Structure formats: C-alpha cells, structure tokens
C-alpha cells in the first residue's frame, strides 16, 4: 500500500466500479453515425474512469512495472478526446511520462499535442524540455502561480532543493487545490477517491536528479515512480 487514507479493499472496489462503468459506457457507443458531441462526452467519461483506475492501482501498491502499459493506454484515450482546458490532466500525464521514461513515440505525441493546443506554460515546457530539448521553458509564463510558483522557485532559486520540495508538498500542493473536483474526495460518498499524488513534484525531482531520500514516505510524493528505472 502506498496510500494511507484507504485500504486495499477500497481501491479494489474503486477499480471494479470503474471497470464496470467503462463497460457500460462502451455499450452506449453503438456502431454507425452518432452525435459527435455525445460520443466525445462518453469517451471523456471513460478516460476519467481509466485515470481513476490507474491512480488506484498505484495507490494500492501495484508494481510500477505493471503500470506502464495501462498508462500508455490511458494516454491514448486522453489524446483521442483532448481538451486543452484540462490543465491538470496534461500536467499529470506529462509528469508520469517523465517518471516512467515512456518511449519517445508516446511522450513526443503527448508533448506535441500539449505544445500545439494548450496555452504556453513554464511547467509544461520544463517537463517537455527534459525529453525534447528544443522546447524552451525559461521565458515561458507560469499559467497557475498557485501552487506552482513555489515549485518553480524550488527549481530556479532554492539552494536546498529537497527542503524546498518538502515545503511545497507540506504547505502548498494539496491546500492550493481546494477548487479541484478531487479535493477531499476521500470524504465523499461517491466512491471516487483514488489517491492524492503530486506527480509534477516527482517529475521535477527526477529531472533535477535530486537526492530525494528525505522525501521518501512524504505524503503526496510518488517516490517509487521517481525511482523507476533509476
């Protein structure tokens, strides 16, 4: 178990519910011409269910090596129904892709879509630059200063970067996502909680090559994703 708020039985239940949800959605998408907006909405729901499944698998302690193929499938679903306004989704997928060191084709496809269709963003470009050096980031604006300005400062200014990352995770990350749909979902009766993980902090730590031993076990920090293939 990597999560401390729920037990294995909880995540087993969430995964089973979402697998059934996806099967129901697929039954609603019949063959032949259909309303494109309706199809897109249904596929978007399937993507969200697949994201919860992947995150629940990570939270309950599945081996990271067994999460690579489901992640690549999840990315394909996202790209098929890409919505530029979904900032956090793109950020999470880019971050996980960096940590899992997915192959160039998968990462470049995702990164290219973000670069072409999303507003320019320092954090997006910083992550992409780690794999595609010709994508610059230094002059890019930071779209969401809360909480990511703290993370940007950790990258650019902090002398003790692991300590700065600790402050980001302890004081800024979760508290700054009060408006997110997943905030406090562990208290909800809707059975949607799949874990709280600051994937971007892990990706930044991996890019910087930090000694993150002080972050191991810290709430929200995806330590063993950072160390996959390390």
Image: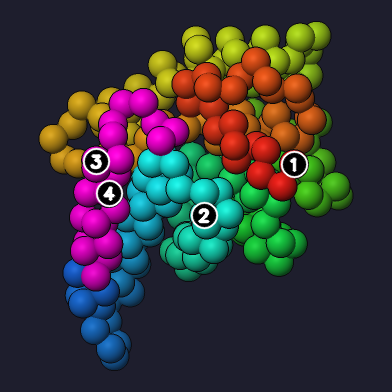
CB within 8 Å, label 3 to label 4: yes
Q: Which mark is residue 10?
A: 3
Q: Nearer the viewer, residue 27 or 193?
A: 193
Give the main secondary structure, helix, strand or loop, of the magenta stretch.
Answer: helix
| Left or right: residue 184 compared with residue 209 | left
Where does label 4 land, which residue? 12
| Left or right: residue 137 compared with residue 72 | right
Start-end of magenta stretch: 1-23
Q: Is residue 206 visible?
A: yes
Please identify the quadrant where the N terminus is shown. Answer: top left
Q: Is residue 116 visible?
A: no
Q: Which mark is residue 159?
A: none
| Left or right: residue 92 compared with residue 108 | left
Q: Secondary structure at mark 3?
A: helix
Q: Given the current orientation, which residue lies at the most extreme bottom position?
A: 32
Where does label 1 land, which residue? 230
C-alpha gap between disc 2 and disc 3: 19 Å
Q: Given the current orientation, which residue lies at the most extreme left position?
A: 189
Residue drawn at 76 percent across, 25 percent down: 210
CB within 8 Å, label 4 to label 2: no
Residue drawn at 30 percent across, 40 percent down: 8
Query: Residue 164: image x %, image y %?
Result: 67, 11
In the image, residue 15 sits, relative to residue 34, either above or below, namely above
Mark 4 surroundings within 10 Å by alpha-carbon count, few (fewer than 14), some (14 through 19), many (20 or more): some
C-alpha gap between disc 1 and disc 2: 16 Å
C-alpha gap between disc 4 and disc 2: 15 Å
In the image, residue 151 sits, relative to residue 230, either above or below, namely above
Q: Nearer the viewer, residue 75 or 215?
A: 215
Q: Quadrant of residue 163?
A: top right
Mark 2 or mark 3, which has the lower sequence index? 3
Please identify the quadrant where the C terminus is shown. Answer: top right
Mark 1 surroundings within 10 Å by alpha-carbon count, few (fewer than 14), some (14 through 19), many (20 or more): few
């Amino acid at each position: 178990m990597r999560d401390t708020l729920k037990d294995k039985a909880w995540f087993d239940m969430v995964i089973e519910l979402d697998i059934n949800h996806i099967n129901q959605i697929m039954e609603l998408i019949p063959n032949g011409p259909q309303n494109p907006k309706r199809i897109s909405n249904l596929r978007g729901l399937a993507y969200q269910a697949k994201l919860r499944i992947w995150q629940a698998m990570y939270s309950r302690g599945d081996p990271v090596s067994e999460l690579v193929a489901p992640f690549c499938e999840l990315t394909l679903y996202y790209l098929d129904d890409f919505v530029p306004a979904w900032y956090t989704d793109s950020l999470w997928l880019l971050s996980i892709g960096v940590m899992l060191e997915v192959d160039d084709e998968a990462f470049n496809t995702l990164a290219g879509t973000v670069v072409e269709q999303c507003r320019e963003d320092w954090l997006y470009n910083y992550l992409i630059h780690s794999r595609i050096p010709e994508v610059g980031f230094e002059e890019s604006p930071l779209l969401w200063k809360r909480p990511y300005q703290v993370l940007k400062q950790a990258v650019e200014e902090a002398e003790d970067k692991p300590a700065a990352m600790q402050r980001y995770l302890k004081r800024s990350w979760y508290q700054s996502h009060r408006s997110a749909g997943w905030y406090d979902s562990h208290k909800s009766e809707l059975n949607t909680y799949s874990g709280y993980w600051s994937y971007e902090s892990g990706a930044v730590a991996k890019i910087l090559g930090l000694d993150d031993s002080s972050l191991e076990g810290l709430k929200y920090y995806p330590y063993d994703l950072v160390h996959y293939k390390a």
